[in-house]
Image (cartoon, helix red, strand yellow):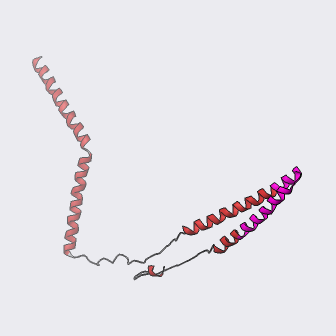
């Protein structure tokens, strides 16, 4: 993290957070072991139960303890998996120099170059304008040719008539 701030980089904000889940993993594993021992004692009681009511009560307790054990195992697996694939988010900003100020008065050669650029841009725009109207020009050309052919045909009929 410290090597990110190189030359020309000013660290504006730096936040580092971490969470140690080792204690929670150890605590959850210990609770799971204690619950397994309690479950084993209930299994012994289940073997000694005589009535259906006693069997159902003991089985209900065993089911509850088993759910707690499975929940703890799931939590331990999640913590181990998520710590193996930890994410590091880094945000940094670098100040850069702004655009340099232009000279107060451009030189003669600079003005000539700008004039050529402007002229070239105008020629390009005119060509693009003409090219964009090619369907209209084509339609007008066909219309004129059609009208001339019609006029010639009418003139021949008048001379013959």
Q: Is residue 120 magenta?
A: no
Image coordinates of residue 109 in percent, x first then y, are: 19, 73
Image coordinates of residue 47 in percent, x first then y, are: 83, 56
Quadrant where the C terminus is found in the figure: top left
42 above or below 56?
A: below
Image coordinates of residue 111 in percent, x first then y, are: 22, 71
91 above or below 135?
A: below
Magenta residues: mostly which secondary structure?
helix
Q: Residue at x 70, y 60 (%)?
A: 70
Q: Residue at x 15, y 24 (%)?
A: 153
Image coordinates of residue 79 in percent, x first then y, are: 62, 67
Q: Nearer the viewer, residue 71 or 133?
A: 71
Horizontal side of residue 29 vs 42, given as left or right: left
Q: Which quadrant of the figure has residue 59?
A: bottom right
Q: Residue at x 27, y 47 (%)?
A: 132
Q: Residue at x 62, y 64 (%)?
A: 78
Q: Is residue 39 magenta?
A: yes
Q: Which residues are magenta?
A: 30-59
Horizontal side of residue 30 vs 150, given as left or right: right
60 above or below 26?
A: above
Q: Nearer the viewer, residue 48 or 7?
A: 48
């Amino acid at each position: 993290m410290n090597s990110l701030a190189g030359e020309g980089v000013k660290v504006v904000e730096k936040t580092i957070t971490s969470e140690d889940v080792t204690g929670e993993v150890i605590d959850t594993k210990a609770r799971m072991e204690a619950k397994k021992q309690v479950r084993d004692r209930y299994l012994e009681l289940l073997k000694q139960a005589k009535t259906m009511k006693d069997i159902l009560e003991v089985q209900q307790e065993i089911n509850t303890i088993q759910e707690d054990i499975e929940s703890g195992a799931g939590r331990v697996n999640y913590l181990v998996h998520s710590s193996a694939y930890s994410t590091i988010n880094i945000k940094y900003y670098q100040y850069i120099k702004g655009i340099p100020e232009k000279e107060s008065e451009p030189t003669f050669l600079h003005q000539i170059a700008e004039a050529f650029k402007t002229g070239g841009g105008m020629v390009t725009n005119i060509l693009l304008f003409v090219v964009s109207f090619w369907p209209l020009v084509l339609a007008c050309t066909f219309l004129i040719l059609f009208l001339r052919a019609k006029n010639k045909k009418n003139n021949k009929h008048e001379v013959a008539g």
